[in-house]
Image (cartoon, grey):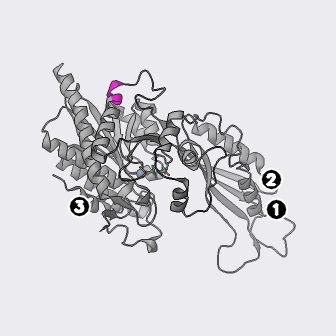
Amino acid sequence: MIDPVESLKEFVRFPSVSTDSTREAGMKDARDYVGNLLKQVGFSVEEIPTPLHPIIIGRRDGDPSWPHVVIYGHYDVQPPDPLELWTNPPFEPGERNGRIYGRGAADNKGPLITHLAAVAQLLQEYPDPPLRLTFLIEGEEEIGSPSFVPFLKKHKDLFDADFVLLSDTGSPNESQIVVTTGLRGIVCLEIEATGPKSDLHSGVHGGAVLNPIQALAEICASLHDKDGRVNVPGFYDDVRPVQDWEREEIGKLGVSEAEYAGFLGIEQFYTEKGYTPFECVRFRPTLEFNGIGGGYQGEGSKTVIPSRAFAKISCRLVAEQNPARVQKALTDLLRERCPSGVSLTITPGHSGAPYLVVPPGKPNTPKNQPEALAAAFRAADEAIAEEFGKPPLYLREGGSVPIIADLKRITGLDSLMIGLFLPEDNLHAPDESFHLGVMKKGIAASKRILWQVASKGVTSARS
Ligand code: BES
Ligand code: ZN
């Protein structure tokens, strides 16, 4: 039997930072650790190489008539910087206030251990349930999963399943769980404006050249209009409108705008006109500047006209938007808006499609929704109500897990996503943590869901 809290602490100790090539050992140790846990629980484990970080597959096979659930998680984490802002070192887990602190505790090691512990308990309490399970644990989620689509195309046979179960999304508080019905997609790119062949003395040459920082800032400033909308023609063309039932769910979140502003430490929201902040983060696409630079960054002043300036941009996309189309619209527009006097280099980064699943019983649920998926949603509703004290809300999420749309597109599988992050978990930030109360109830809920699904296997095996 695995001890979930101790296992999480152990797992957090391995510095599995996928973007950092000096962390190869941490990646390998994290893989070995989770692979061994799976073996302990009775799974056959395979490490599938990719050009970058291997994928771990853990299988519990069985009669083909049994239900088959794929459980997804990722063993990679974000870089821990800035280190000086952590209370305990990011890879030396601390336990305080009913939480485990450390990089990756919430995103995604804690939620992954939650489902693994649920499976371990299920298999111990009900030996040999009629249920096939496949753990899919990747190591490139935090860098856009570059190896995932080729992997999936090659190993499609592993995913002849009923649905995917995962927890890599959030909920508003420990008693109100969200079942996530959508994820935003993403399009990243970097732009560089280049002017004179080298940095120039701004007294000697200032007045004669277009400063690349000015050019870049003007381009960037043109990308939103006064109503907070993204000022790129065609950007909103395919956006799925917010559904009435989704607005109702938002109303039940139990958080006021003032509380949200207080949580963020801001005086005023900046939103797209016509939408509340809660709607904007879940249902509307955005264009953000993630980094901008150029010229002198050191102490004091330096009178220079830099030869270059850059900005890192990402767009979050919502259901029905197409990443390639958005990337083209944005790239074309950036070129058009680039003033003569500088040249613009545009380098595309990673991209991923948005994802949407309409749960059973909501308006416009697809008529051909597989019964196994609908049954899994119903089981989740019941299990969450039992274990957390309230039925879940059904909401789309602002963050992205692009492989979920890839799985749908390539294998047809939909995902049942149970939000286990809380707003205080500090994902991607210093003092990241995972709430142990959520973990405990999450284990119980996951176990119930899987048992419900297995019971269908009992029925189908008998019938
Ligand atoms: N688990 C997060 C996504 C997330 C965060 C969902 C918060 C819900 C709430 C995931 O690990 C993540 O950070 N994804 C990246 C994807 C990107 C690197 C392609 C993201 O959303 O920025
Ligand atoms: Zn994650």
Report the residue at 66% width, 50% height from top: 346
The foreground one among 179 and 137 is 179
Query: In the picture shown, does residue 151 fall above or below 225?
Result: above
Q: Which mark is residue 339?
A: 2
Among numbered discs 2 and 3, the one appearing first in the sequence? 3
Q: Secondary structure at mark 1?
A: loop
Q: Secondary structure at mark 2?
A: loop
Q: Quadrant of residue 25?
A: bottom left
Q: Which mark is residue 210?
A: 1
Among numbered discs 1 and 3, the one appearing first in the sequence? 3
The foreground one among 437 and 220 is 437
Judge left or right: residue 456 versus residue 346. Answer: left
Judge left or right: residue 2 versus residue 265. Answer: left
Report the residue at 41% width, 32% height from top: 359
Among numbered discs 2 and 1, the one appearing first in the sequence? 1
The percent coordinates of residue 283 (x first, y second) are 55, 42
Q: Are marks 2 and 1 in contact (CB under 8 Å)?
A: yes
Q: CA distance from mark 2 to mark 3?
A: 58 Å
Asked if the stretch drawn in magenta spans residue 372, the answer is yes
Using a 10 Å C-alpha cutoff, classify the residue at mark 1 as few (fewer than 14 neighbours), some (14 to 19) or many (20 or more): some
Q: CA distance from mark 1 to mark 3?
A: 59 Å
Q: Is mark 3 within 8 Å of ligand 2?
A: no
Using a 10 Å C-alpha cutoff, classify the residue at mark 3 as few (fewer than 14 neighbours), some (14 to 19) or many (20 or more): few
Q: Amino acid at mark 2?
A: Pro
